[in-house]
Amino acid sequence: MTRWLIGAWCGAVLCGLILPGHVLAQTPEEKSREAFNAQSKTLAERIDKIIEARLAAAKVKTGAVVDDAVFLRRIHIDLAGRIPEVVTLTDFIDPTNDNPNKREEFIDKLLASDEYANNFANYWRSLMLTENPNNFQAQALRPSFEAWLKQRLKSNEGYDRVVHELLTATPVFNGGNMNNVTPAAFYFGNENKAENLAGATSRIFLGVKIECAQCHPHPFAKWKQHQFWEYAAFFSGLQQFNRPQQQPVNAFSREIKIPDSDKIVKAKFLNGQDPKWKENVPTRTTLADWVTASENPYFAKAAVDHIWSYFFGVSLLEPIMEPTDDSPPAHAELLDVMAKEFTEQKFNLKFLIRAIVLTKSYQRVSVAMSEKTKDEVQLFAKMPVRGMTPEQFFDSLSMAVGYKDPNAPQPQFQQFGQMSPRREFLTKFTSQDKRSETQTSILQALMMMNGKFLAEHTSLDHNESLRVISTTTTPQKRVSTLYRLVLSREPRPEEVARLSQYIKAGGGTGDQRQAVADIYWALLNSAEFMLNH
């Protein structure tokens, strides 16, 4: 009887598969995911249409779409925060892998990974926290701030809810307790001063730079001094923390005295509107409600510009922070379309990111920023060559040399003050304000060329993978393996010919194994490895 039931069930399944017109019912989750994917692809197409129309009007030619190897490296750094593993690269660029949707499927795989959450936690933290090594409290709270961001990104919480939580958080110093994830570092990083918090929140969450109006009317934009302090009044209930045990003093304070004057101003939104105060609702909650509201014209556009700038190294508002009548938004239509869709998708960061990286504009060839290429980069005809974040650089280097961080997969929980290889790198490889304008300091160059970490991990005595590469197969295959491992691509014929000859000759020592190690070290120190392109 049991066998008959199993046979009947199998037969029904097979019949269902082969009967014409039979469609298996989708689950609500599948329907939601399908709609999500379709809507993000539609937005990607709209973005490309707007950009291509602008390029046509400016008579600027678009660059070609990159090959699979370049795409894979670029998307892996941008989403996962590091270069891909060799096995991932090999599978993706395999000529027999002709899946027409493989780029889209790989994007989805990365967006679902913990590495995505880690990478963007680093990114948002770099935007929200001011790096000040002398601010002990902010530095001690930084790991728990990153952990807080990672949790929200991993669950794909709406950006509006993340910002709302930050703006209403209680800035209590927890002594760097890693078990208590909190955004309090944002407040300590701004010294819990109303004027510092006003400048930071307006710049980061509203895309408006009003600090210049703190002491006098802004010399170019329309912001006046009283407007700055009206906005700062929302934070007047926070006193400056000189000692860790101090607490916020007045959650309902709604006015502030302008320094060096007798004038007291009441809290007012940046759009000039007076808040509608509610009984027993703290002042910063009223502010957070306004900042993150779907009808707020500033909030969505500022978020979209942050994400766009991350991927393209170029702002859609140039300059985003200080638009004036003489300096209008450079890509107003593009910004409006994305901000509208982002809002309608309930501020879903993965939706916005997915749409951007699916565009042809994102997948075009790259070019170094210069006067000659300025129009191509600013009109998005080509991708700019961008600097990696410090975390991306170290994690890519670790992948290339086979280094395993003992604090992985949560490197932010490393003990505060501990000088591990990762922390040492992060202190010397600072983030760039504009990632399309890459710089390398003397300290960075010396650390790569002469530093203990790289010297140790590129030595034949220490690196097992290098020992295997240097003693097996032909010189040509050794070169190919090194290029895949470090640069995530196949070497060009002329590179194979030149470097194979170098290996055969034994380099400068007459030792073929050492010649392979020399090439390995040189590739790791190359601009091609250090940059995202």
Image: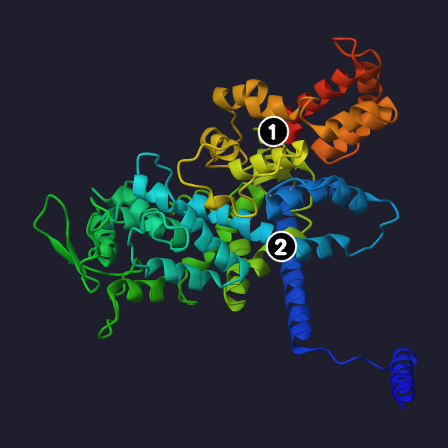
How far across and down, in percent of the image, does residue 175 sit?
32, 48
**Displayed quadrant of residue 7:** bottom right
In the depicted structure, whether residue 92 falls above or below residue 101: above
Identity of the residue furthest to the left in this view? 262
Residue 285 placement, left or right of 433: left
Neighbour tally class for label 2: few under 14, some 14-19, many 20 plus, Cα within 10 Å: few
Please name the amino acid that badge 2 sits on. Ser
Q: Residue, x 43% and y 67% (percent of image)? A: 294
Q: Is residue 6 visible?
A: yes
Dot label at residue 372: 1
Q: Is residue 222 visible?
A: no
How far across and down, in percent of the image, does residue 494 sit?
82, 22
Please name the amino acid that badge 1 sits on. Lys
- Considering depth in this image, is 165 or 315 the residue closer to the camera? 165
Query: Whole-Å distance between the Cαs marked 2 and 1?
Result: 39 Å
Residue 67 placement, left or right of 50: right
Q: Which element is circle 2 on? A: loop
Identity of the residue furthest to the front in this view? 1
How far across and down, in percent of the image, does residue 170 sit?
29, 58
Identity of the residue furthest to the bottom in this view? 1
How far across and down, in percent of the image, does residue 361 sit?
66, 47
Q: Residue, x 66% and y 69% (percent of image)? A: 33
Dot label at residue 113: 2
The mark total stands at 2
In the depicted structure, whether residue 222 falls above or below residue 523: below
The disc, 2 or 1, on the residue closer to the chain's N-terminal end is 2
